[in-house]
Amino acid sequence: MRVTVFGGPKSRLRSYASPFHSGRAWIYRDPVKDSRKLTDFDVVSWRPGLREMYERVTAADVAVETILASHGGGGNWGRALSLAEAALDALASADEETCSRILLCFLWQWIDFLGIRPDLDHCSFCGKPTSSGDRLLYLSGEGGMACDACAADHIGGEGRPGSPAAVFAEAGPGCRHWLETVRPLSPLQLNRFTLDKRSFTEAKGFLSALLAEALGRRPVTDW
């Protein structure tokens, strides 16, 4: 729903209805023009800290884009709002490094909420369980996680893109362990769960590939 907010730069209503604040809105619909106007907004949660750091607002933008692109997870806006508020509350006071981990956690929880979380303990093709030291490859053209042996049949082996599934993302042991550890946690706890650079890069690529295939596009905001 698109709603118009009237008022100048110093308008109380415009400041209340700024992005990332949470609250209760009152909307007037003009039946003749079929337009909607925000008439009042009762703020429940202020998050001014989000705009104090580039990394915070960027992560918040990606989270909101993801929610809107998936239409609130098929219309379950209540659960969508709960996940969004938990992530935004954590981001509002997070340091630069933690912001990226909070976003990863949110995206993984959102993927779980959408019902598209793949099994990270088994190969989707041969069904064999994976050990803690194994890597898996997500084959977006095939929609599953492949062990190295099965991946060789689909992308030419050794991580070289081929046919028929040219788009893939690696999920190594560190990446998989971190994702499964933080999935049930509150984003406010992410400052205690560090992530090495390689595993972060893998998790970012893996989650981005999952969402891109499910939603039909990647986030507009670069992160």
Image: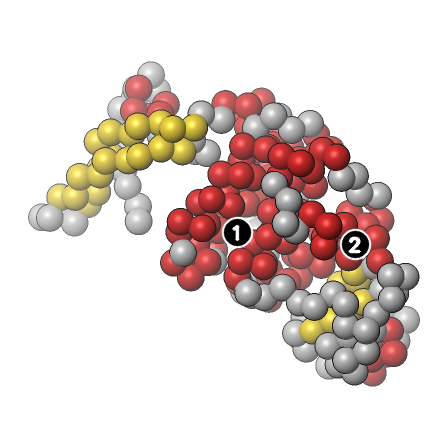
Q: Nearer the viewer, mark 2 or mark 1?
A: 2
Instruction: Residue at 69% x, 47% y: name it.
Output: 182
Q: Residue furthest front?
A: 184
Examine the rendered structure and indicate whether residue 47 appears above or below residue 4. Answer: above
Dot 2: within a 10 Å radius of its alpha carbon, few (fewer than 14), some, or many (20 or more) residues? Answer: some
Q: Residue furthest top?
A: 10
Instruction: Please state, as top left, top right, bottom left or bottom right, where the C terminus lies in the image.
Output: top right
Instruction: Residue at 59% x, 33% y: name it.
Output: 90
Residue type beneath disc 1: Thr
Judge by depth and name the residue closer to the eye, 135 or 119. 119
Q: Quadrant of residue 160?
A: bottom right
Residue type beneath disc 2: His
Residue 24: image location, x then y, percent: 31, 34
User: Which mark identifies residue 177?
Assistant: 2
Instruction: Residue at 74% x, 65% y: name it.
Output: 120
Instruction: Residue at 71% x, 33% y: name it.
Output: 191
Judge by depth and name the residue closer to the eye, 86 or 72. 86
Residues at marks 2 and 1, CA–CA distance in whole angstroms:
24 Å
Q: Is residue 158 left or right of residue 161?
A: right
Residue 135: image location, x then y, percent: 85, 64
Judge by depth and name the residue closer to the eye, 43 or 48. 43
User: Which mark identifies residue 66?
Assistant: 1
SS assignment at label 2: helix
Q: Earlier in the sequence, mark 2 or mark 1?
A: 1
Residue 132: image location, x then y, percent: 87, 61
SS assignment at label 1: helix
Judge by depth and name the residue closer to the eye, 215 or 172. 172
Examine the rendered structure and indicate whether residue 89 appears above or below residue 31. Answer: above
Dot 1: within a 10 Å radius of its alpha carbon, few (fewer than 14), some, or many (20 or more) residues? Answer: many
Q: Quadrant of residue 139?
A: bottom right
